[in-house]
Amino acid sequence: MPFANSDIQQVNRPPAGISNRPAFFGVLRHLVALACVVAGHGMAAAQTPAVGAKAPDFTLQTPTGTTVTLAKERAKGTTVLVLLRGFPGYQCPYCVKQVHDFVEHSADFATRKANVVLVYPGPPADLDQHAKEFLAKQQADLPSNIKLVIDPDYKMTNLYGLRWDAPHETAYPSTFILDASGTIIFEKISHSHGDRTSADDILAQLKTN
């Protein structure tokens, strides 16, 4: 039986809701991509561990290539973990001063069976050389209970949620005291260049913990 004109028009007409399918799927793809970006940022932005929490473990290297693992360091006793600004394009004078202060008090830290791990973050290009130049400013070798490691990919910095993501910045200067189990018993997070813990500040905390 032949089709009427109205039947032919009905056959050629796209079903309801399908005529805008390309535009619909274009919007859907955009929303999925946006969701992935947001989820990715959420995964990368770790939270800074609080007092009472376990300090996340990490493995980094000294400027000369020696591997240092936080878990092995804290197994020796109390660990003072110091995140410096590292190399934001220059040697931070506040970092130089802070490390010099800790080095001068290394015997006091040893008396309290505390070791110090300094983390020097920055862009990966030549960061080991920059760290060597930084250590040269101390005018003495680091004592055996103080180690400096480099963080060229901001691995530790991001793990602890301390990335200072702004021009000419690297990390928020921070200090943690960990007991032998890795529990954080003290922390200070600075949002300015010069607000640092001194060796006396940390030694006072070690007396009370």
Image (cartoon, helix red, strand yellow):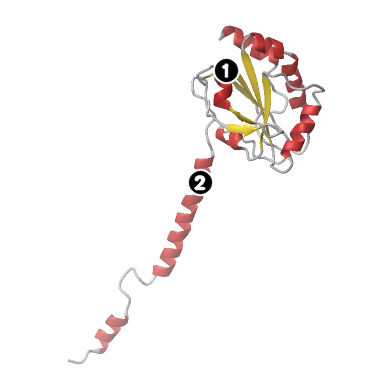
Quarter of image, res 189: top right
**Residue sitting at x 26%, y 89%:** 5
Calculate the distance from the C-alpha at mark 2 to the C-alpha at mark 1: 36 Å
Seen in the picture, residue 69 relative to 28 is either above or below; the reply is above
Q: Looking at the image, tell me whether mark 2 or mark 1 is earlier in sequence order.
A: 2
Total marks shown come to 2
Residue with the most extreme left position = 1
User: How far from the left and from the top, in percent, is residue 153?
Assistant: 63, 40
Q: Is residue 174 left or right of residue 137?
A: left
Quadrant of image for the C terminus? top right
Camera-side residue: 116 or 90? 116
**Residue sitting at x 73%, y 25%:** 194
Checking the image for residue 40, the label placed there is 2
Q: Please give the residue where the numbered disc 1 appears in the rendered image.
A: 76
Q: Is residue 164 left or right of residue 98?
A: left
User: How far from the left and from the top, in percent, is residue 19?
Assistant: 37, 72
Element type at mark 1: loop
User: How far from the left and from the top, in percent, is residue 146?
Assistant: 68, 21
Q: What amino acid type should be assigned to the residue bearing mark 1?
A: Lys
